[in-house]
Image (tube, rainbow, N blue to C red):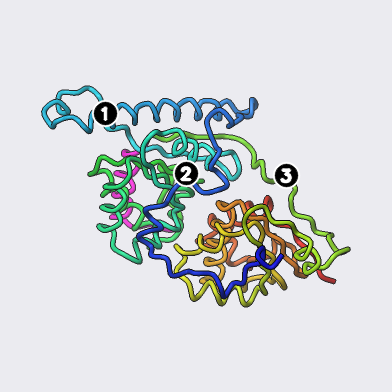
Amino acid sequence: MKDEILNIDDIDFSVSIDSLIESNAIPPKFKKCTFENYYPDNNYPSQEEAKNKLKAFVKQMEDFRKIKERPKLLRAISKVKKPKNIYLDGVYGVGKTHLLAAIGNEYKHKSAFLSFSELTYLIAYYTLEDVVKELSCKFDIVLIDEFELDDPGDAMMGINFIRQMNKTDCVVVATSNTLPSQLGQRKLDILVFKERIGKLVNSFDTIIIDGKDYRIKLKKIEFNETSKSIESIFETYKTKGRKKLIVDFERLIEKLKEVHPFRYTQLSYNLDALFIENLRPFSSEELMDALRFTHLIDTLYYGDVEIFASGKYNIFDLFHPDLKDGKFKTKIGRCLSRLSEKCTLITQT
């Protein structure tokens, strides 16, 4: 039984970020995602259209790779050109990440999968030039989930990253909740920035996916689980090859401060279930803690980790209104959407 239990202080977060990049494959939750097991909603034809376009893109990438390996002269006269970057736009929960992972799973060669947050953390840790070189030399396709330009600093990182990647043979496929033509309109009224936005738009083929958030229909969150304590649920929870961890919310937040966010996967990918005691809302002054937590939820989601939490508050009140309506509202909205799928709340009275 003890072999199933993980202590947060025993986790080895010292693994090098270089090795994490090298092993940046499709995360556990999406390992089995294919185009065939993406089931479009017939009420939204754009879902079927998106699937077909992305299947064609994979074929184009396979053809382009063959051309890349030819001598320069033969490559120059070839009619096969580098495919344009792809931009998947849609609301939460229409299967954008499923389709993104399907590209990586069905492409026969090397691709990297990163969330946009991981990308910005990487660039901040190294340099833009180093990250572009590392990714473009090792991978043919870079898959970026939830491309965000809400924050001006992160926005500039993302735009410059695309500009530099466009100079390589590597192709970027990104998901987001904002159309490229709308990027930069969220209080970012800077002429230079808008100029760069224009270049970014032209480097992407935009695929719009309409639909409704399937996670809301799952109704995973249970608000009245009062017959058992979180401790008793933890004791009886059966793991399925990985481990389980119970930790107080305040201790969890302190640990997240100590660890580079790119290493959060060392926690998430080793767990079947995380139990958080005494969950409470983030105040408007706790932006950095809130952002670390949203990144953790992203990695837990990718790791397909079940989340149990005890607390006196509704999950949808987890973030102060100033945070939910602020410049990181996209990130926080995604966090709440993913919690609605993965989290069981044990309410305290």
Q: In this figure, which residue is indicated by the disc labeled 3?
A: 218
Instruction: Establish if 76 lies above or below 342.
Output: above
Residue at (42% x, 48% y) in the render: 183
Q: Identify residue type, mark 1.
A: Lys
Q: In this figure, which residue is indicated by the disc labeled 1?
A: 66
Residue 191 falls inside the magenta stretch: yes
| Location of residue 195 in the rendering, given as x and y in whole percent from the top left corner | 29, 49
Magenta span of residues: 187-204
Determine whether the residue tagged by mark 2 lies in a helix, strand or loop. Answer: strand
Determine whether the residue tagged by mark 3 lies in a helix, strand or loop. Answer: helix
Residue at the extreme right of the image, as rendered: 227
Residue at (55% x, 63% y) in the render: 267
| Location of residue 243 in the rendering, given as x and y in whole percent from the top left corner | 64, 61
Secondary structure mainly formed by the magenta segment: helix
Give whichever of 148, 302 is nearer the camera: 302
Determine crowd level at label 1: few under 14, some 14-19, many 20+ residues with C-alpha closer than 10 A. few
Instruction: Report how far apart the C-alphas of labels 3 and 1 lie in the structure.
Output: 43 Å
Q: In this figure, which residue is indicated by the disc labeled 2?
A: 175
| Location of residue 106 in the rendering, given as x and y in whole percent from the top left corner | 45, 33
Which of the 4 image quarters holds residue 4?
Answer: bottom right
Q: Which mark is residue 253?
A: none
Disc 3 or 1, which lies upstream in sequence? 1
Q: Identify residue type, mark 3.
A: Leu
Location of the C terminus by quadrant is bottom right
Residue 57 falls inside the magenta stretch: no
Instruction: Report how far apart the C-alphas of labels 3 and 2 lie in the structure.
Output: 22 Å
| Location of residue 342 in the rendering, given as x and y in whole percent from the top left corner | 67, 53
Disc 1 or 2, which lies upstream in sequence? 1
Relative to residue 167, is residue 57 drawn left or right?
right
Location of the N terminus by quadrant is bottom right
Residue at (74% x, 50% y) in the render: 220
Relative to residue 87, is residue 296 drawn left or right?
right
